[in-house]
Image (tube, rainbow, N blue to C red):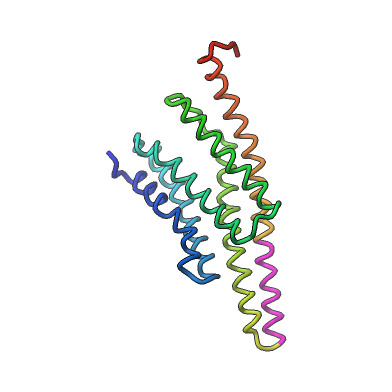
Amino acid sequence: MIWTVPNILTIIRVIAAPFVALSFAVFERPFADWFAFCLFMGAAFTDFVDGWYARKFNATSAFGKMLDPIADKAMVIIALFSLAVLYGVNWWFAIPATVILLREVLVSGLREYLGDIKLDVTNLAKWKTTAQMCAIGGLFLAAGWNTYFDVADVKAAGELATRKMKIARVGGGYVFYLSMGLLWVAAALTLITGWDYFRKGMRYIREADGVAS
């Protein structure tokens, strides 16, 4: 049965993914940044809910198992692309983003090859996903925050108003650096968990080739 609660939430994520990028074509900034933030974090929350619901009420399905990783990867790839446009392709963003994307491609290819052989998701991989989602959401939030104060600085009247906005802008800086730090943490966990998946997968590949482990 396709129209279960988990599958509906997964379909919503697939539909929402392109709108993370399209929000910047439809809306002016900083509203576009905040819309992308809400959309991305809402999708991340539905990812948690549909997994919890499927396990608790035994509502798993072949359709959901097929579509869920596609929805997750589409959301992450489109979000990272949007952030690269917002912040520019700087080394401090390009390195962790490339590591995350490369791992997604390699693990997807490995799972496709293994077919019915399931590689269990580890607790470390769940922490990686949490850090990754929080980092990406935080970077959208920081981009909107800084854009808002860029506009507000121009419209500010009086020294007091400008001083208050400069103080408030510091908060956006903290959000940015915290989020960027989390992105690097996610990239490090990506390398660790990616190697773990690859190591486990190679055991089955060696067996298929008749090579002793």
Pick the quarter of the image with the C terminus. top right
Dominant secondary structure of the residues highlighted in magenta in the image: helix
Q: Position of residue 12 (x, y in %)?
A: 38, 52
Q: Nearer the viewer, residue 156 or 174?
A: 156
Q: Position of residue 95 (x, y in %)?
A: 67, 47
Residue at 36%, 44% in the rendered image = 6
Vertically, is 49 above or below 82? Answer: above
In this rendering, the count of numbered labels is 0
Vertically, is 195 above or below 166? Answer: above
Residue 128 is one of the magenta-drawn residues: no
Pick the quarter of the image with the N terminus. top left
Residue 160 is one of the magenta-drawn residues: yes
Q: Position of residue 5 (x, y in %)?
A: 33, 46
| Horizontal relation, residue 50 to residue 119: left or right | left
| Horizontal relation, residue 119 to residue 185: left or right | left
| Horizontal relation, residue 63 to residue 86: left or right | left
Q: Position of residue 62 (x, y in %)?
A: 35, 34
Q: Nearer the viewer, residue 158 or 59?
A: 158
Q: Nearer the viewer, residue 182 or 79?
A: 79
Residue at 51%, 71% in the rendered image = 28
Q: Indicate the quadrant where residue 88 lies.
A: bottom right
Residue at 58%, 52% in the rendered image = 134
Vertically, is 160 above or below 87? Answer: below
Q: Indicate the quadrant where residue 126 lies.
A: top right
Q: Start and end of the magenta stretch?
A: 159-175
